Image (tube, helix red, strand yellow):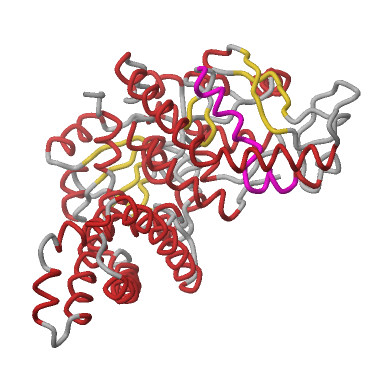
Amino acid sequence: MERNTGMWQLLRRQSIRWLALLALVEFALLSCAVALAAHLRYLGNAGGLADFMPWLWPRAALFALALMIGMAALGLYQQHLRESWFGLAARQLVGFAIGLAGLLVVYYLLPDAAIGRGVLAIALLLGFLLVQGWRLLFARLIDIDLLKRRVLVLGAGEQAAAIPQRMRRRSDRRGFLVLGYVRMGEEAVRVAAEDVLEVEGSLRGYAESLQVNEIVVGPDDRRCGLPMRELLDCKQAGIAVSTLASFFERERGLVNLALVEPSWLVFSEGFDTSPLRHAVKRVFDITVALLVFALTWPFMLLVALAIVLESGLRAPILYRQPRVGEHGAVFDVIKFRSMRTDAERDGVARWATRGDTRITRVGRLIRRTRLDELPQLWNVLRGDMSIIGPRPERPEFVADLARQIRYYNLRHAVKPGLAGWAQLRYPYGASVEDAEQKLKYDLFYVKNHNLLLDIIILVQTVEVVLFGRGAR
């Protein structure tokens, strides 16, 4: 079995437990929608209902699972999803459409699994309404302070101020409630004055009086003297103790470079490079690559034909470009050509920018739909890349970025990927500043990657493709 340290860390997060509750209830509601639809469809027809009842729940479970995969593909199980009610309803509608398409394929291959057109139509309508109602209730439920993890922060300076500065939105704070900040030593206070607390008595007694669930340690200067004995006493009393860097990693899904020291990277959990993890990831890569190729080869032929029609028979369809891979090894990435053949005639590497005039008309379309990336499936099958991982950059950019951004080369600890955590959480980057922001998410993936996270990223990448987020 693959080492599950990172997976269990993921499941221990309060926000993930909320998402698990959301998914479990929706699975139950969608399954019940099928049962209720059957009773409505066969109302007054006891014989028809009796014929339908055998294998009702397995078929209902298949219905629920298909629709939930469709919703997941539209990002409806993201931890920090920020949408209006109309936006959520639109996503859910498209997610149901994707799930329905999958169901129809399954019903074609396995006719005995079908629930009939009448039951299916009613179940879709009931399921949509039930899920909408539950999500409205859930949105109110997770905002109740009594159900949130109660956090006390040791520190009130620049580092501690990153919490109110970087997690201002309500969606960022769904899993926790900051009770206040305790000034450490002589640090300058950078949080709101009304949020600064004075510890009365022992730290453990004070924390217990406030019903604290977690103490986050984030002073500007650790030399001010952390109360280690008192923190140990709190930990023995069942109060979790974590660093500010670990808190950000858990709650925001990134590694905050401003808070990270080499010792934290060395001693914190993660960075699974075991042979078993490599083997599991390789099997996952090959399986998904072959499946995606089987589903997309007709589109690849159409893209090749479109490039020929636009640029002529003598113009290349594919192009190769050096990229930096695992452990800094350079390989040639393969893509459909989306720029003019003279895009870099002077030999100078340039970022792609919004409205880039070097991009062809066909190139603009295939970049927006990510079809230009499909030939990289060959890179995956060869072992140069993975399905999931940090996006590979050109050696010229890597050399420059490594000089300007600390820890940049850590992203090369794993194979680059077709899709990645940074692509889900941050738009297309075309500058050093963008690269630094994306690195925060890349390092989170490098540190916490496991099969579950790979599957989550793969499913949510469908949303990126459908809505064209980050394309240039």
Q: Quadrant of the N terminus?
A: top left
Majority SS type along the magenta span? helix
Q: Is residue 375 left or right of residue 20?
A: right
Residue 131 percent location from the top left of the image: 32, 70
Which of the two residues, 162 or 415, is positioned nearer the viewer here?
Answer: 415
Taking 76 as reference, is 424 above or below it? Answer: above
Q: Residue at x 72, y 28 (%)?
A: 318
Which residue corresponds to the image point at 61% horizontal and 30% vertical from the top-left?
A: 375
Q: Quadrant of the C terminus?
A: top right
Residue 347 appears at what percent x and percent y?
86, 20
Q: Is residue 367 magenta?
A: yes
Q: Nearer the viewer, residue 370 or 313?
A: 313
The x, y position of residue 344, in whole percent, is 85, 27
Q: Quadrant of residue 13?
A: top left
Q: In this view, does 381 lie above or below 157?
A: above
Estimate the x, y position of residue 236 in percent, counting from the top left.
13, 35
Indicate left or right for 101 with 228 as reference.
right
Extreme residue in the bottom direction: 44
Q: Residue at x 46, y 29 (%)?
A: 260
Q: What stretch is highlighted in magenta?
A: 364-382
- Can residue 176 be seen? no
Q: Does the magenta stretch include residue 270?
A: no
